[in-house]
Amino acid sequence: MLNNFVLDHRQIVDDAAQVVRGKLEAVVARVAQDVIAPVDIELAGEGVRIPDTGSLGGDLLAIARGAAATAATPQGQAVVRAVVTAGAHDAALAAANHRFWSERLALDGTVVERAIARGELPADADPRTVIEAVLGPIYFRLLVLGEKPDSAFVERVVGLIAG
């Protein structure tokens, strides 16, 4: 009799946890769609300072350090996680997120265009791909591994790309 009670109790706890997770996901989705996405899209290009250090490595390092610092904050992580999670289930939010990142990658891509003009990269280098190659490892480390990228990590990533 006691074993059945324990098993039933565990099932009730598991069921309750699933309900709470479902409600939490719904709240996160609603907040992401109604609050975060409009603000993020509006701010995609606001206040963005495109570095101009005179070298591709210096510019990419500045972009990478800025991204790592912003994304490493609890607020930055929460926004990215909420938008990614909710965007998987909400087409409008996914589209808004895509617009945000398209604009942001294009702005950051300016440093690649300047590097091409200086002869640091071949003429056919794709600015978006270069910026994605810099930012991808930072977000992977933060969001998938749950680790904050330190300065040495950011420098190694940029070194792999900028040489």
Image (cartoon, grey):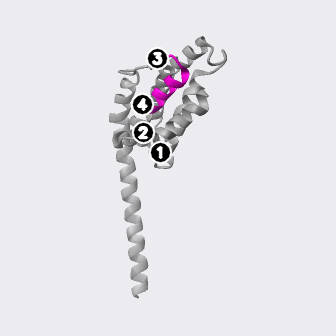
Q: Amino acid at mark 1?
A: Leu
Mark 2 or mark 4: name the one nearer the start of the chain.
4
* Image spot of residue 148 (x, y percent): 44, 45
Q: CA distance from mark 2 to mark 1?
A: 8 Å
Image quadrant for the C terminus?
top right
Task: Kindly report which numbered mark, 2 or 3, lies closer to the viewer in this rendering.
Answer: 3
Query: Which residue is disc 3 drawn over?
Result: 52
* Image spot of residue 147 (x, y percent): 46, 48
Mark 2 or mark 1: name the one nearer the start of the chain.
2
Q: Amino acid at mark 4?
A: Gly
Query: Which residue is disc 2 drawn over?
Result: 80
Taking depth in this image into account, of 5 and 107 the one nearest to the observer is 107
Image quadrant for the N terminus?
bottom left
Figure check: 129 above or below 4 = above
Mark 1 or mark 4: name the one nearer the start of the chain.
4
Mark 2 or mark 3: name the one nearer the start of the chain.
3
Mark 1 or mark 3: name the one nearer the start of the chain.
3
- Would you say the residues marked 1 and 3 are in contact, meaning their CB atoms lie under 8 Å apart? no
Figure check: 54 above or below 89 = above
